Amino acid sequence: MTRLSLYRDSASADPGPTLLLESDDAEVIAQALAERGLGYERWPVKPELPAAADHAAVLAAYAGEIAQVQASGTYPTVDAIRLGPDHPDRIALRQKFLSEHTHSEDEVRFFVEGRGLFVIHLEGEVLQVLCESGDFLRVPAGTKHWFDMGSAPHFTALRFFDNPAGWVAEFTGDPIASRYPLLD
């Protein structure tokens, strides 16, 4: 179930993060994120994809939704990422995005299957958004965040870009991510 956990940003000397709000209500989540300049929607998902479905099959299954997003002209490039618990690079991929970073473009994801934890660091707040299938999330360019796919990842997501080359993470060097709960 999708869940928002909103914490007061705590300094490393503090005893730990202070939980201010926790909700699994999609309307509450959408409103809280919108108030902070983030986008969140719930979209219908297709029946479960076959285990052997490759990226092309995922893109084909969601061609209508992709066309809808691309019609705005903002995100002309899309790809699909699918990671399972047996992926040979799962440990390295998880570690790579557990550190706070930013991107020079929006980070836009639609979770087709599974789940992942987006953590967004705004001035004075940290928002953990446990995204599950059906969640569409938009994090504006320059927003500090990190992502946890868990130790046994299971997710498929569409990723939308405004740059055909895709996005590049710019790490902040702040150890803040180590002070907040992980997906597992």
Image (cartoon, helix red, strand yellow):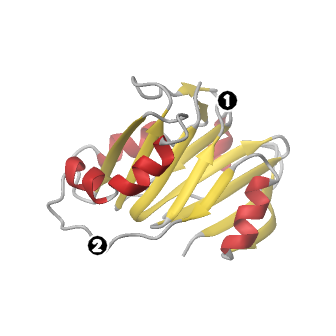
Q: Nearer the viewer, residue 154 or 141?
A: 141
Secondary element at tag 2:
loop
Task: Report whether 81 appears left or right of 43.
Answer: left
Task: Report whether 150 appears left or right of 16.
Answer: left
Q: Nearer the viewer, residue 161 or 104?
A: 161
Q: Identify the residue shown where x is 47% and y is 28%.
A: 167
Q: Which residue is mark 1?
A: 142
Task: Report whether 50 appears left or right of 29.
Answer: left
Q: Identify the residue shown where x is 64% and y is 27%.
A: 172
* Amino acid type, label 2: Glu
* Amino acid type, label 1: Gly
For mark 2, does the 10 Å Cα neighbourhood hold few (<14), some (14 to 19), or many (20 or more) residues?
Answer: few
Q: Position of residue 97 (x, y in %)?
A: 48, 40
User: Would residue 16 be seen by someone viewing this image from the given angle?
Assistant: no
Q: Position of residue 126 (x, y in %)?
A: 74, 51
Tell me which numbered mark, 2 or 1, is placed earlier along the sequence: 2
Figure check: 151 above or below 56: below
For mark 1, does the 10 Å Cα neighbourhood hold few (<14), some (14 to 19), or many (20 or more) residues?
Answer: some
The mark closer to the camera, 2 or 1, is: 2
Q: Which residue is mark 2?
A: 48
Figure check: 49 above or below 71: below
Q: Identify the residue shown where x is 43% and y is 44%.
A: 159
